[in-house]
Image (cartoon, helix red, strand yellow):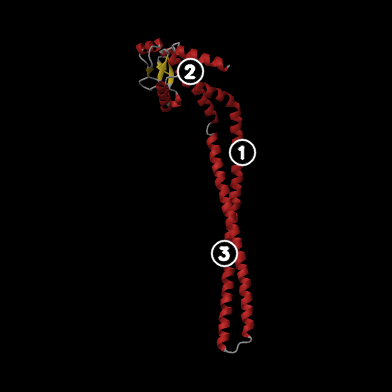
Amino acid sequence: MAKTKELTVEDKLRSLYKLQLIDSKIDDIKNVRGELPLEVEDLEDDITGLTQRLSNLNEEVVKLQEDISDKKNGIEEAKALSKKYEEQQKSVRNNREFDSLTKEIEFQHLEIELAEKRIKEYKVKIEQKNEVVATTTEKLEEQTSHLEHKKAELDAISKETEKEEGLMLKMSEELSVKIDAHLLKAYKRIRSNVKNGLAVVSIERGAAGGSFFTIPPQVQIEIASRKKITIDEHSGRILVDATLADEEIAALDKILA
């Protein structure tokens, strides 16, 4: 059985830098989309909340209308009872019965007054809720229109970038499998802790890419020899020489051409 060829430090550095280039392209694609996915999600949540609020308001209006109907029925019943008692007064046999019926009539009149008062209150509440329904409906229409616009914008960007992003994600996944697990873990840790997600950078004008701290000549020679993995003491990034970086950039550009 043939032995698996052990990767050299240079092989590992090339794989790491290639992975960095690919992941950076994925980052760039996500940056093009920007906050759109979150904006779409927030708008969808907002619309769900407004829709539920409208549903609740409409249910409350229906309930108030039912309460008005009940009060109106109560008024009709009270009027009927009042009329009945008034008729009975015409045939009472003594003052006690007359006074008793008078109290019943007065009670029914009070019931009518109270019911009419409640109806007015309910109508005011309905009017107030209908105003809220109108403003909420207007807000819902605005947010729905805004959501459609944002979705169209996101879809357009996604269609432009989905092919490239799919290829980049596939390449990133395939390359990650080939990299030593401990090294990949370190790469991901550094990448999550540094600006712009750059965990592997090349030497530019004697300093680590994006840094102003000059790297000593002896360290630059060691990096160019590709015999060990060097970490920048200032930024914590993995360093590669400019020649290696240029070669990997050119190789990736050729693949994507």
How many dots with numbers? 3
Relative to 252, does residue 35 appear above or below in the rendering? below
Residue in the image at 61% along x and 34% along y: 152
Q: State the mark number for residue 121.
A: 3
The answer to whether the residue labelled 2 contacts the one labelled 1, judged by CB atoms less than 8 Å apart, is no
Which residue type does callout 1 highlight?
Glu
Q: Position of residue 193 (x, y in %)?
A: 41, 27
**In the image, 108: left or right of 14?**
right
Residue 203 in the image, given as x and y percentages of width and height: 42, 15
Residue 92 versus residue 249 in the image, above or below: below
Q: What's the residue type where badge 2 is placed?
A: Lys
Question: Which mark identifies residue 18?
Answer: 2
Residue 161 visible in the displayed image: no
* Cα–Cα span, label 2 and label 1: 38 Å
Whole-angstrom CA distance, mark 1 to mark 3, is 40 Å
Residue 173 horizontal side relative to residue 257, left or right: left
Chain-order first, disc 2 or disc 1: 2
The label shown at residue 74 is none
Residue type, mark 3 in image: Glu
Which residue in the structure is indicated by mark 1?
148
Mark nearest the camera among 2 and 1 is 2
Residue 59 falls in which quadrant of the image?
bottom right
Quarter holding the C terminus is: top right
Q: Residues within 10 Å of mark 1 (few under 14, many from 20)?
A: few
Q: Where is residue 44 in the image (x, y as percent from the top left)?
A: 56, 41
Residue 97 visible somewhere in the drawing = yes
The earlier-in-sequence mark between 1 and 3 is 3
- Position of residue 76 in the picture relative to residue 190 (left or right): right
Describe the element under mark 1 as helix, strand or loop: helix
Q: Residues within 10 Å of mark 3 (few under 14, many from 20)?
A: some
